[in-house]
Amino acid sequence: MPIGTIGILSWVPLIRTAFVRRRAWDWVALIGTALLSLAAFVAVGSAPNEDSAQTTVGMITLLLLAAGSTVHFLVAELRTPPASQPAPQPAHLLQTYVQPYDPPWQAAPMAPLLPLAQVKAELDELSALLHQNQRPAP
């Protein structure tokens, strides 16, 4: 995003970095980048013409912020370890704190399973009845 917006939104990726890493330096970098980006944007917008030094300094600042915040974000993402799973608790601790779970619904009782031979006999009987009631085609 910083590269596509020419540095105007260079502070946006640093928001995620600051929230994920929770380091003071990341918050300082976020606030500093946002303020510097705003100042450079105002400098470019209020310049008397396109060839002034004010425009040049503002655009160079925005482009450097775009590159710097992108690099900082990528380095921070590569160095941040993935969220680890909590350590498993011993079984005796779990029993004292965890209440047994009773589901709010009860499973419907299953019909008893029929032996395969009985199912086959019933299907044969149905097949015979269908063949008896079959009408010849006109």
Image: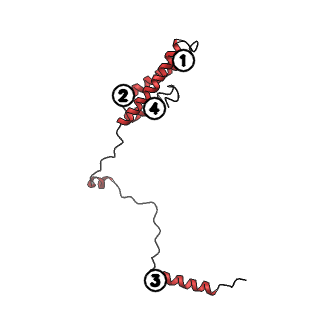
Is 112 located above or below residue 8 in the figure? Answer: below
Label 2 packing within 10 angstroms: few (<14), some (14-19), many (20+): few
Q: Amino acid at mark 2?
A: Ala
What residue would you read off at disc 1?
Answer: 44
Between circles 1 and 2, the one closer to the viewer is: 1
Q: Amino acid at mark 4?
A: Pro
Residue 106 horizontal/vertical position (percent): 45, 65
In the image, farthest residue toward the right: 138
Instruction: Tell me which colouring the rendered structure shows.
Output: secondary structure
In the image, farthest residue toward the bottom: 132
Label 4 packing within 10 angstroms: few (<14), some (14-19), many (20+): some
Label 3 packing within 10 angstroms: few (<14), some (14-19), many (20+): few
**Which label sits on residue 95?**
none
Q: At x 49% / y 29%, what residue is drawn?
A: 3
Q: Mark 1: which secondary structure?
A: helix
- Cα gap from disc 4 to disc 1, whole angstroms: 22 Å
Q: Amino acid at mark 3?
A: Ala
Q: Amino acid at mark 1?
A: Val
Q: Quadrant of residue 112?
A: bottom left
What residue would you read off at disc 2?
Answer: 24
Q: Mark 4: which secondary structure?
A: helix
What residue would you read off at disc 3?
Answer: 117
Q: At x 46% / y 62%, what residue is drawn?
A: 105
Between circles 4 and 2, the one closer to the viewer is: 4
Tell which circle, 3 or 1, labels the residue nearer the N-terminal end.
1
- Cα gap from disc 3 to disc 2, whole angstroms: 74 Å
What residue would you read off at disc 4?
Answer: 13
